[in-house]
Image (cartoon, rainbow, N blue to C red):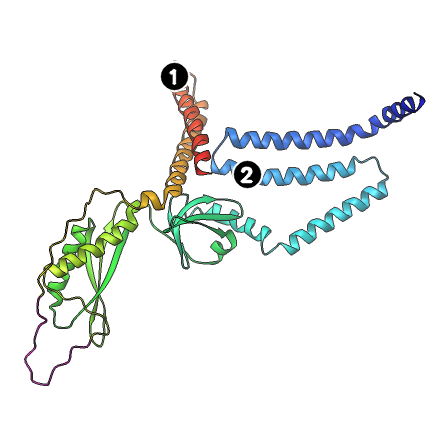
Amino acid sequence: MDMITQWLAEFSAAIPSLLPLLSSIAITGFLLFILRRRINNDPSEGARYRSQWMGVLVALVGLCSVIICLPVSDSVQGNLLTMLGLLLTAIITLSSTTIAANAMAGLMIRVLENFKPGDFIQVNEHFGRVTEQDLFHIEIQTEDRDLLTLPNVYVAANPVKVVHATGTVVTAEVTLGYDLDNHHVEKVLKQAAGEAGLDDPFVYIMDLGDFSVCYRVAGFLKEVKQLLSARSKLRRHMLDCLHGAGIEIVSPNFMNQRQVGQTLVKPELRRRVAVSPVDENETAPEAIVFDKAERAQSLQELKDSYEEIKSELSELSNKESSEEIKELVGRKKRRQKALKLMIQRFEKRVE
């Protein structure tokens, strides 16, 4: 009994010295909880990045305050703070090419805003649609439906090709013989591009090889979500139109030899084999290949709408209050609440 009483007395005497330490831990935890709640209440991309940086700063300040509030001598506190400073310096120095560099590159990419979730991008040989932009990496969904993670340093250090959201030019190349009239070839290739659903088709002569001519046909595609299907459809219609016009497609290494003075003989036309028509209404492969990217783009569009309504509410709050303004604010707040719920559901689906 005396031992318990003595222990309680010692504990009661130590409580005043532990109060600052417990208060620091509680305040740090509370601030981190508030930042987490802020991300949930404000799902915009800007708030997410700001909260991540604020979380790192709060954790560092909280750790320093815990060391300062420890019930130890000043010399021990100084040594602990010195060790913490050396530890942070070593971490930053050793990880300058990884964590810190990726964070800085992520901030730069975020400021530039060259692309967003749902956009087609190509970084060197990596091509796909963006599904996620984070502080340290970018995730894209490739043509094989696989998810590829690219460090922000890699993306920032290499040229990034972004397919324009309002439309892009789809191209394809084919080699044909010198015995063909290039004006006729251009007409047939433009017809193929038009049947493939491309606007304003045009043809370039890319190269005059030793044995064949290289043509490039191109056209404008408005709906970039169907980029893969459009590329395949263009090549399919090129085959159909060229074969239908009796034009033989040759390899760049094909050699057509003839004696000097011999009459030019055009290749014999082969009868086309009847094939079943392709169903143009079949499901586009992009719906399967880029399923996560589609959800990420929808999520980004919802976040953009959320930000737009948020700015509109901020502008309305500065105007004089009236019944009409109050009714408009009420509608926009209901819309904002509905968008918030939709964003939370989409975030779970994307994850």
> At which x and y percent is residue 127?
39, 54
Please, which residue is most extreme toward the left here?
263
Which kind of residue does numbered mark 1 sit on? Answer: Glu
Residue 263 on the magenta segment: yes
Mark positioned earlier in the residue sequence (2 or 1): 2
Residue that label 2 marks: 50
Which kind of residue does numbered mark 2 sit on? Answer: Arg
Number of numbered callouts drawn: 2
Q: CB of mark 2 within 8 Å of CB of mark 1?
A: no
> At which x and y percent is residue 168?
29, 51
Secondary structure state at the residue bearing disc 2: helix
Residue at figure coordinates x 44%, y 24% from the top left: 337
Q: Is residue 148 visible?
A: yes
The magenta segment is: 255-269
Residue that label 1 marks: 327
- Quarter of the image for residue 341 reads top left
> At which x and y percent is residue 234?
22, 54
The answer to whether 40 appears left or right of 300 in the picture is: right
The answer to whether 142 appears left or right of 187 in the picture is: right
- What label sits on residue 94 in the rendered view? none
> At which x and y percent is residue 11?
86, 26
Residue at figure coordinates x 65%, y 52% from the top left: 92
Residue 49 on the magenta segment: no
Height in image: 164 above or below 264?
A: above
Please, which residue is most extreme toward the top here?
323
- Quarter of the image for residue 324 reads top left
Query: Which quadrant of the rendered structure holds the N terminus?
Result: top right
Q: Using a 10 Å C-alpha cutoff, classify the residue at mark 1 as few (fewer than 14 neighbours), some (14 to 19) or many (20 or more).
A: few
Please, which residue is most extreme toward the right here?
2
Prevalent SS, magenta region:
loop
